[in-house]
Image (tube, rainbow, N blue to C red):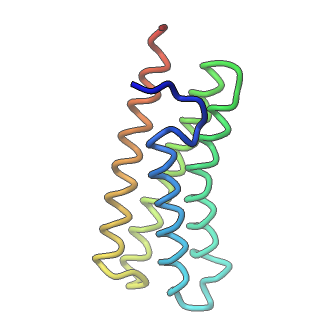
Amino acid sequence: MDKIRSYKDLIVWQKAIGVVTDVYLTTKKFPSEERFGLSSQMQRAAVSIAANIAEGHGRGTRSDYAHFLDMSNGSVSELETLFIIVRKLSYCSDEQCSKIEGQLHEVGKMLGSLRSKLRVRP
């Protein structure tokens, strides 16, 4: 297995970037009155997932890294909740919502796995 030299090498970070892209493309289609409401909140939550993975990786200690992974996971839960809301408001097609919800589930599982590995000393 290759050594992780950068947060950019982490598959979970790469998948989180995919979530950001898909969220931006999806929220672009929301009603204009949601530009500063749900759209903005969803975009910030999506960016937060990837950004906290990166920031945690750049920290000096395992406990700091774990803390930022926890924050990232919190943003996953926030975004999942926001997708429940936009689905109920019919702002997102079932297909598009399901795609991103699946990505979020996968990222959440990967964050949990990475978090667990931080507890184990090398």
Q: Nearer the viewer, residue 69 or 86?
A: 69
What percent of the width, then of the height, locates residue 70?
Answer: 54, 36
Residue at the limit of the structure toward the top, as seen here: 122
Indicate left or right for 74 with 55 as reference.
left
Q: Which residue in the rendered view is the most extreme toward the front? A: 2
**Residue 23 locus on image (x, y percent):** 50, 69
Vertical order, 48 against 6 (above or below): below
Within the image, what quadrant is residue 90 found in? bottom left
Instruction: Report the label total.
Output: 0
Quadrant of the frame with the N terminus: top left
**Side of 44 relative to 100 (left or right):** right
Closer-to-camera residue (4/51) = 4
Q: Residue at x 49, y 49 (%)?
A: 14
Q: Position of residue 107 (x, y in %)?
A: 41, 47
Q: Residue at x 57, y 49 (%)?
A: 50
Left or right of 23 on screen, residue 71: right
Q: Nearer the viewer, residue 36 or 22?
A: 22
Q: Could you tell me which residue is drawn at 35 percent across and 40 percent down?
A: 109
- Above-or-below relation of 76 to 58: below
Q: Residue at x 66, y 18 (%)?
A: 61
Depth check: 36 or 66 in front?
66
Q: Image height check: is 29 above or below 10?
A: below
Q: Is 69 rendered above or below residue 81?
A: above
Instruction: Give the side of residue 65 with respect to residue 91, left or right.
Output: right
